[in-house]
Amino acid sequence: MGWPEIPLNSAAGQRADGPAALQCYLAAIAEVGETIEAISPEIAASFRDPLLLLHSRLSSDPAPTSRTLEQSRCALHEILQGFCEKARVRNAALARDLHQTLSMVTRTEDSSADRNVEHVERLVDFADRLETAVQSGDLQQLAIETSELRDFAQSIELGSRDDFARLRQKMIEIQRRLHEVELLATLDPLTGVANRRDLDRELAARIEARQEFCVLLFDLNGFKEINDRFGHLFGDEVLKQLAARLGSHVRARDYVCRWGGDEFVAILACDLAIAESRSCQIVERLNAPYHIRGDGREIRVDLAVSVGLAQYCSGESPDRLFRRVDESMYRGKHSSPSG
C-alpha cells in the first residue's frame, strides 16, 4: 500500500509522550489500511485514499490538538463503518448467489425425479399399446406407436441434455468466481505480485519438497522521502514499477512477493553462490532510474535498493531463515558507503 514506516522509539514501560502517542496512532491507521486490504482487496480499494489522506494530515501536524485528534478518530470510525457495510453487502450477495445455486440444484433434482416418474408411466402406457397392436396384428398402429416411442425417447435425451448443460454452466461460473476469490487472497492488490500470506504457502511447499532454494529480501532506501516529497500515489507507482522489474528478472521456477511496505522477497531455486551473483544483477536493474508520469509531467526517481540473502538449511524454521536474511541485509547496509 506504500504506507510510510513509523518509528516507535519509546522504551518498554516508559510513559508515552505526545509525539510517541501520535506515532502509535499513525502506525495503527497504517495497520488498519493493510488489514482491510488483506480481508477484502476489491472493497478496500475505495477506502484507501481516505485512509491515506487521514494519515497524511496527522503526520504533517507535529502537535495536533485534542480537537484534531477527536475529528480524526471520528473520520477513522466512519471509514471503518463504511468498509464493514460494504463487506456485509458483498458477503450477503455471495451467500445469496450460493443459495440460489443450491436451490437450482435441488429444483433440478426434484424436477428430474418428477420427470422420471412421468417417463415411467408413459413407457408403461407405450408397452401396453404396443402389446395390443402386436396381438391384433395391426401393423399400421404398431408403426405409429413405434414412431411415438422414438420421439418420446429423443425428447427425454434433449431434456436431460439441456438440464445438464444449464447446471454445468452454473457450476463453471461458481468455479470461476471461487478461483477469483482465491487468487485475490494471494495477491498484493497494489503491485499484482504475490502477498505475504502466499509466501508462507510457497515456503512450506518448497520445504516439504526438500528443494534447494535461497531467499532474497529487497529493501528500498529512502522510500519515505519519496512519499513525503511527491505523495503516496506517486510512491505507489514506484512500487508497481519495481515489482514489474523484479518479476521480469526471475525465472519461471523462482518466486516474487511483496513482503510489506517497501520490502519485496524473491525465492531463487539455486544455491547460495548462484543467488549472490544473481542478486547483484537484480539490484543493478532495480537501481536503474524510475520515470513516473503525473500532473502532466514526468519525474525521474533514483533509488538505492539493499538486499539480504540466505540459503535454506534443512530443518530450520521459516522464522529462523528470515532472521538470517535480515541480518545479511543489515550487514550489507552498514558496509555500503551510503549505509
Image (cartoon, rainbow, N blue to C red):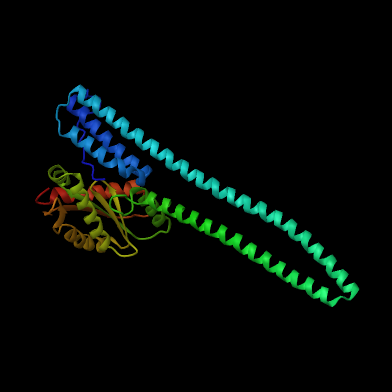
Q: Quadrant of the N terminus?
A: top left
Q: For residue 76, say whether it is visible.
A: yes
Task: Please state if 261 lies on the left or on the right of 101 as rendered.
Answer: left
Q: For residue 315, say whether it is visible.
A: no
Residue at screen point 10% across, 49% down: 338
Task: Please state if 196 lies on the left or on the right of 331 as rendered.
Answer: right
Residue at screen point 22% across, 26% down: 69
Task: Give x and y (percent) for residue 279.
Answer: 22, 60
Among all residues in the image, which is located at the extreme left?
A: 337
Q: Quadrant of residue 256?
A: bottom left
Task: Give x and y (percent) for residue 102.
Answer: 57, 49
Task: Please state if 167 lies on the left or on the right of 251 as rendered.
Answer: right
Query: Foreground: 307 or 41?
Result: 41
Task: Give x and y (percent) for residue 50.
Answer: 26, 38
Task: Please state if 301 lies on the left or on the right of 266 as rendered.
Answer: left
Residue 158 position (above or below residue 261): below
Q: Quadrant of residue 245?
A: bottom left
Query: Foreground: 190 or 287?
Result: 190
Among all residues in the image, which is located at the extreme right?
A: 136
Residue at screen point 83% across, 70% down: 130
Residue 178 position (above or below residue 127): above
Query: Foreground: 336 or 190?
Result: 190
Number of numbered discs on residues: 0
Task: Give x and y (percent) for residue 71.
Answer: 24, 26
